Image (cartoon, grey):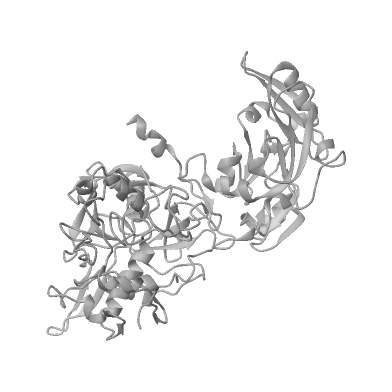
C-alpha cells in the first residue's frame, strides 16, 4: 500500500471557512500558484551566476516571477530606503558538506554575495525593528519553514505554500513562533480583520478577543490584504468562523473542503477507463483511492477559465439519511420513507430552471433528441477521445467543446448541485404543461413511467422547504455527485467519519446510496447523428457497517430504491457560475 500512503497521510487540519483552501491538497497547491500569479509587488533579485552580489530591483512584478525576495506593494519599494537597504537574517547551506551556516545579519544583496563566494545556497528574511539573528531559525529556513498564524492566536511551523493553501498568515522563512518571549501570532501589534476591513497596529489579544482575525506581528499586515486578489481578509463565507472537521454548522456537519480537481476520494475512478466498453462498465467494483479530476464544469469555474483554482467549497453533510413522511390514504397511518427511486422514469436531465421558473438556454433545445447527452457518437470514437472529452486538467479544452459528449453524457461526476437541479427541473417540466419549440413536457414521460414510486427529488424538495438558510453564501441541500460521494467514502474509510457522526447524535453512513450522477447502459447514450437514448441507470455507492469490509461502486437501475445522504456547499470564494442559482427551485 506504499503507493497510497501520500493520499492517506494528508491531514484534516482546522481551516477557516471562506479561505479558499483544501487540507487534502498536495503540498504543491494550485491555489498558491494562482495567488503568486496575481499578487503584485516589488522584487529584489540576484544574478544567476558570479560572486559580486549584483542585485536588481523590479516593480511591478508578480511573486511567481520573482526568484529573490518579494514584498507585496502598491508602489515601488526599490532603493536604499526601501527593501534594498533593509537588514535581515541570512541563512546559508553548504550542500557539499551538508552544513548549515549560522545566521548572518546583512542585506539581501550582501547575503547573496556571501553565498556566491562560497557556492552556498541561501535564504534571507527581512528584520523588523529591533529584530536580530536570534529570532531566525536557519535550520527551519533551509527547509523553507517558518511561522504560520491561523488568525486566532495559534502558530505552527510550516512552508509558505501550505500556509497559503489554508489561507493563513505566513510570517516569513526562518521565523519562529516565539520571538523573544512573545508569540508572534497573538502578542504585540499587527493587522486586525473583521471580514471586510483591515485595521493596523491593533494588539493581537484585543483583536482575537473581539472575535476578529489577527494576522500576526512579523510582517506588515497589508501584505496579506488586497481587494483584488481574494486574500484572507477580503472574504469569509461564514464570517469569523474557524471550523474543524466534525464541527456542527449550517444545519449539518462540516466535513472538510472539497476541490473538484484535486480532492482525495475513495470510489470508482472514472478517469481510468481504457476502452469505450470499459467506460460504460457499471458492474460492481471495489472502491480505490484516487484524486478527483474536473469534468466539463465545476463549482465557480467556467469552461473557458479552467485555471481558476479558487474553485473549492466547504462541504456540509446532513446528520441523517434523507427521510420523508406521508399519511396512508386508506389507514391514515403516518409512513416514513427512507429509500427512494432515483427518478420516476423518463429522461431526467431537465431544462435549466431558477426559483422563478424554467429558463431555456440555446443548447437546451437539443434535449428533444439528445435528452441526457451521449457517450459514443460513431465508430471513430476512441477511449482516448472520450477520456479527453470527459475530464481535463487546466485549460485542456476549448470554449466550444461539446458538453453533451462524455462518459456520462451531460451528468457530472463533480457537480452534484447542478445534477440535482437538472433532475428537479425535469420533474417540474414533466408536470408543467409547457412546450418550448420542439421540446414538450410530454418528452419527460415514457411507457415505463411509474406514478407510484417516491423519487429522491421529492425528499430533496421537502428538506429544502423545511430548512432556513443561515447565510447568503449557503446552498440548498442536494444529492452528492459520484466524486463527492467518493470524498465522503474516503472520510468514512480513513478518517473515522461514522464515529464522529454518532458522537454528534447523527446516523452513520451505511448501505447503498444514490449519487446524482446519471449514466447509460447498453445502447443508451449512443448518438446516431440525430438522436441518442436517455439513460436508465445512475451511479451508486455501498458503505459497509464495518470499515474493514469492501466499499463498492456500481450503476443501478433508476427504479431501484436506495438511501440518500444530502450535502450542501458554502463556496470558499463566494463566486458561483454565472446565471446558476445555488438555491434549488422547489416549485414553479
Left or right of 18 on screen, residue 253: left
**Residue ID at (38%, 34%):** 5
Give the vertical position of 543 relative to 107 (above or below): below
Outermost residue toward the right in this view = 81
Left or right of 146 on screen, residue 253: left
**Residue ID at (49%, 49%):** 22
> Could you say where residue 237 lies in the image, as x and y percent from the top left?
54, 62
* Front-most of residues 156 and 70: 70
Asked if residue 588 can be seen in this view, the reply is: yes
Give the quarter of the figure containing the C terminus.
bottom left
Give the vertical position of 90 relative to 409 (above or below): above
* Front-most of residues 506 and 261: 261
**Residue ID at (30%, 85%):** 434
> Could you say where residue 93 lies in the image, as x and y percent from the top left?
66, 21
Give the vertical position of 336 relative to 218 (above or below): below
Task: Locate residue 369: give its quadrant.
Answer: bottom left
Give the quarter of the figure containing the N terminus.
top left
> Could you say where residue 416 lies in the image, as x and y percent from the top left?
36, 61
Give the vertical position of 490 relative to 568 (above or below): above
> Could you say where residue 512 lies in the image, as x and y percent from the top left?
22, 56
Asked if residue 168 can be seen in this view, the reply is: no
Outermost residue toward the top in this view = 97
Left or right of 152 on screen, residue 472: left
Amino acid at each position: 500500500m506504499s503507493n497510497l500512503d501520500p493520499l492517506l497521510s494528508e491531514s484534516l487540519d482546522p481551516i477557516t471557512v471562506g479561505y479558499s483552501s483544501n487540507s487534502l491538497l498536495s503540498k504543491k497547491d494550485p491555489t498558491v500558484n494562482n495567488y503568486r500569479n496575481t499578487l503584485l509587488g516589488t522584487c529584489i533579485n540576484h544574478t544567476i551566476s558570479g560572486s559580486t552580489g549584483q542585485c536588481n530591483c523590479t516593480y511591478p512584478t508578480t511573486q511567481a516571477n520573482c526568484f529573490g525576495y518579494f514584498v507585496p506593494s502598491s508602489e515601488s519599494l526599490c532603493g536604499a530606503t526601501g527593501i534594498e537597504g533593509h537588514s535581515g537574517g541570512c541563512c546559508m547551506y553548504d550542500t557539499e558538506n551538508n552544513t548549515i551556516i549560522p545566521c548572518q545579519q546583512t542585506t539581501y544583496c550582501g547575503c547573496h554575495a556571501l553565498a556566491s563566494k562560497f557556492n552556498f545556497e541561501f535564504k534571507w528574511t527581512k528584520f523588523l525593528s529591533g529584530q536580530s539573528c536570534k529570532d531566525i531559525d536557519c535550520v527551519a529556513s533551509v527547509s523553507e519553514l517558518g511561522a504560520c498564524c491561523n488568525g486566532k492566536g495559534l502558530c505552527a511551523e510550516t512552508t509558505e505554500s501550505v500556509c497559503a493553501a489554508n489561507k493563513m498568515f505566513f510570517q516569513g522563512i526562518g521565523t519562529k513562533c516565539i520571538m523573544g518571549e512573545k508569540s508572534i501570532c497573538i502578542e504585540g501589534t499587527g493587522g486586525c480583520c473583521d471580514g471586510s476591513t483591515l485595521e493596523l497596529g491593533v494588539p493581537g489579544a484585543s483583536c482575537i478577543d473581539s472575535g476578529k482575525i489577527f494576522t500576526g506581528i512579523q510582517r506588515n499586515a497589508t501584505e496579506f490584504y488586497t481587494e483584488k486578489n481574494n486574500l484572507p481578509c477580503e472574504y469569509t463565507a461564514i464570517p469569523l468562523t474557524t471550523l474543524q472537521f466534525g464541527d456542527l454548522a449550517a444545519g449539518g456537519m462540516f466535513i472538510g473542503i472539497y476541490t473538484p480537481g484535486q480532492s482525495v476520494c475513495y470510489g470508482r475512478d472514472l478517469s481510468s477507463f481504457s476502452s469505450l466498453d470499459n467506460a460504460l462498465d457499471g458492474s460492481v467494483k471495489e472502491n480505490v483511492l484516487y484524486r478527483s479530476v474536473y469534468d466539463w464544469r465545476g463549482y465557480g469555474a467556467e469552461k473557458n477559465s479552467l485555471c481558476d483554482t479558487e474553485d473549492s467549497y466547504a462541504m456540509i453533510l446532513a446528520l441523517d439519511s434523507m427521510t420523508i413522511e406521508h399519511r396512508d390514504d386508506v389507514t391514515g397511518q403516518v409512513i416514513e420513507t427512507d429509500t427512494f427511486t432515483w427518478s420516476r422514469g423518463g429522461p431526467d436531465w431537465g431544462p435549466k430552471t431558477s426559483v422563478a421558473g424554467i429558463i431555456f438556454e440555446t443548447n437546451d433545445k437539443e434535449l428533444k433528441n439528445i435528452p441526457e447527452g451521449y457517450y459514443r457518437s460513431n465508430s471513430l470514437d476512441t477511449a482516448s477521445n472520450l477520456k479527453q472529452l470527459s475530464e481535463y486538467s487546466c485549460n485542456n479544452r476549448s470554449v466550444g467543446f461539446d458538453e453533451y459528449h462524455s462518459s456520462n453524457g451531460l451528468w457530472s461526476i463533480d457537480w452534484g448541485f447542478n445534477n440535482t437541479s437538472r433532475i428537479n427541473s425535469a420533474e417540474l417540466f414533466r408536470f408543467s404543461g409547457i412546450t418550448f419549440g420542439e421540446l414538450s413536457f410530454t418528452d419527460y414521460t415514457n411507457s415505463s413511467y411509474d406514478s407510484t414510486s417516491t423519487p429522491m427529488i421529492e425528499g430533496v424538495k421537502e428538506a429544502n422547504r423545511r430548512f432556513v438558510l443561515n447565510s447568503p453564501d449557503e446552498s440548498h441541500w442536494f444529492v452528492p455527485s459520484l466524486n463527492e460521494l467518493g470524498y465522503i467514502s474516503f472520510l468514512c474509510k480513513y478518517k473515522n467519519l461514522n464515529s464522529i457522526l454518532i458522537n454528534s447524535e447523527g446516523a452513520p453512513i451505511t448501505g447503498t446510496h444514490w449519487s446524482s450522477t446519471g449514466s447509460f447502459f447498453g445502447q443508451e447514450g449512443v448518438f446516431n447523428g440525430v438522436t441518442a437514448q436517455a439513460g436508465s441507470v445512475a451511479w451508486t455507492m455501498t458503505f459497509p457497517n464495518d470499515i474493514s469490509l469492501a466499499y463498492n461502486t456500481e450503476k443501478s437501475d433508476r427504479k431501484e430504491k436506495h438511501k440518500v445522504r444530502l450535502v450542501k456547499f458554502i463556496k470558499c470564494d463566494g463566486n458561483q457560475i454565472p446565471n446558476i442559482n445555488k438555491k434549488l427551485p422547489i416549485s414553479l
